[in-house]
Image: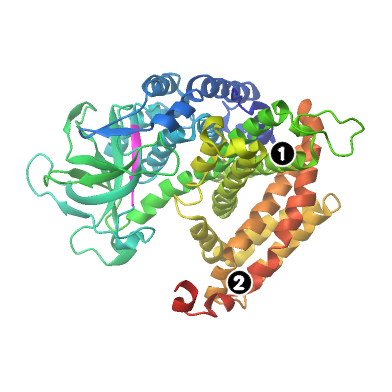
Amino acid sequence: MEYTAATADQILAIRVNAGIEELAAHDRFAAASPDMVEAIVEGIGQFAAGEWAPLNRVGDQQGAVLADGRVTLPAGFAEAYRGYVEQGWNAISGDSEFGGQGLPFTLAANVIENVGTANMAFGLLPMLTVGAIEALSHHGSAAQKALYLEKLISGQWSGTMNLTEPQAGSDVGALRTTAVPISDGEHTGKYLIKGTKIFITWGEHDLAENIVHLVLARTPGAPAGSRGISLFVVPKFHVAVDGTLGARNDVRVVGLEHKLGIMASPTCVMSFGDNDACVGELVGHENEGLKAMFTMMNSARINVGSQGVQIAERALQQAQYYARERVQSARAGAPGKDPVAIVEHPDVRRMLLRMRALTEGARALLYYTAGQVDRGALSVDGAQARADCLVPLIKAWGTDVGCEVASLGVQIHGGMGFVEETGAAQHYRDARIAPIYEGTNGIQAADLVTRKLGYEGGAVLTALLADVARAADGAAPQLKALADDCIEVAHWMAGEASLDDKLAGSVPFCTMCAVAVAGWQLLRQVGAAEGKLAQTKPVIAGYFNTHLVPEARGLKAAATDGAGLLYALDAEALAG
């Protein structure tokens, strides 16, 4: 089947949930006129469908290959990436001072959604570059910005994030990579980097001219744990002051991970300083690496949440096509006995409607989050704090949605979904990584109940949920009840619950909040939908609020049960 971008639904979400017209009323984003927005969404959708989508299957079957220290991609990837760069898609929200178009993050998020839906593994390449741009823009020196940002914003160079080490996993404070100051020679003032990083997405490849690695490391005498981590920029090729590329830096790929999915995304084991000659430059201040890295991480987490939407959309379209084409059995209760397309069977319709409700709900939440990020950039009061609270919701629930929708897609295909020839299994395999990387979904939920719930003594999160309750009052009783439940759980967690109790209930609570906000955003879309969406959106929102919202309300018991049962068995009895 051919993939078609979900342009109409995206434009609706950008208009209603992100509030693009309100953003364009500010001088900074005045260029984001309705015509410009439509041209970008339609243009990137057509480009992604025409150039990146056809590479999705071959990328899964052939994957990235490491040979003689070089990583290569299947035929067609280099040309498709070159087209992406030359057409300016990577530069949508980049700073105009460095060649970017200066448009809202919301529109850059749409670019990432479209290329990722067309080809999730490929879409990780620009996604990580966006994060590198964010980190350098906020924390880099003037010289670093001048040297790196223009090429990163254009996409001519790509960026990576190097956190994880074999012994550390999610415990970044346990990393051992070192950074020793250079006191003489041409690199005086810089650092010698030495260590090994794993799970480095697009850490080595042949599509961009240079790869700019952002690396966490420890300087001599740094405090133990996360307080002693600094961030360094380590280019694959040394960069002269005039921006020209020099010799190869002492950084190399030593292995590719053998993965369940995203085969065309080279997930690398990177070695820095094998010859004691890997040169890096400090970004920001010493021992403040996590602060800088989390700037990059938050951008990445929103875009990983987008990956849930991406894979859900792709799996949904394939399931819809199969359900229309696959003829099997008569419809139960129908007067005739002739076999019908399986889309006519009640359970298949249930699954398709659930897939659409989840996908469109997650997309509405994605663009609401993006719009709050843009308002934060405009210094709109309270917007950045609200955006911060939304990040764990879209990352965790959005990626859970991707997994569920991809699984339902396999189910609709029946036995044909379990074999690789149909391609439904690829979506299921690709989706599974998203709840894990950029902070597992458990970490997102923990962040929500330990850090974000503490914003202004809980007022930021409860104000968000109160907005949901007000909008749903009289229009969607179950949604209002869910919002009220969320507020009640938030008060319990902020009050009598112990830290263990909060963490024990964090995942169900995170899901409850995400479903509540997504249901609200779908409700907002109903009154603004036009054309075909005016027919479908009330049904999709209605299904979401009468089926998915009550399910989320059922999580309240788990969210407030506390940690007692989790520790009723000792470790040996539980895992022995």
SS assignment at label 2:
helix
Image check: 228 left or right of 8? left
Residue 436 lies, in percent from the top left, at 47, 52
Image check: 332 left or right of 280? right
Residue 411 lies, in percent from the top left, at 64, 42
- Report the amino acid beneath label 1: Leu
Q: What secondary structure do most residues of the magenta stretch adopt? A: strand
Mark yes or no: residue 101 visible.
no
Q: How is the image coloured?
A: rainbow
**Residue farthest toward the left in the current orientation of the protein:** 185
Q: Which mark is residue 352?
A: 1
Neighbour tally class for label 1: few under 14, some 14-19, many 20 plus, Cα within 10 Å: many
- Give the vertical position of 312 relative to 39 (above or below): below
Question: Was residue 160 drawn as part of the magenta stretch in this picture?
Answer: yes
Image quarter for residue 260?
top left
> Do residues under tags 1 and 2 come within 8 Å of each other at their CB atoms?
no
**Residue under circle 2?**
494
- Foreground pick, 52 / 517: 52
Precedes in sequence: disc 1 or disc 2: 1
Residue 463 lies, in percent from the top left, at 67, 58
Mark 1 vs mark 2: give the one in front: 1
Q: Residue shown at 17%/43% (left/top)?
A: 279
- Label 1 to label 2, Cα distance in Å? 38 Å
SS assignment at label 1:
helix
Neighbour tally class for label 2: few under 14, some 14-19, many 20 plus, Cα within 10 Å: some
Question: Was residue 172 drawn as part of the magenta stretch in this picture?
Answer: no
Part of the protein shown in magenta: 158-163
- Report the amino acid beneath label 2: Ala
Mark yes or no: residue 2 visible.
yes
Residue 145 lies, in percent from the top left, at 32, 36
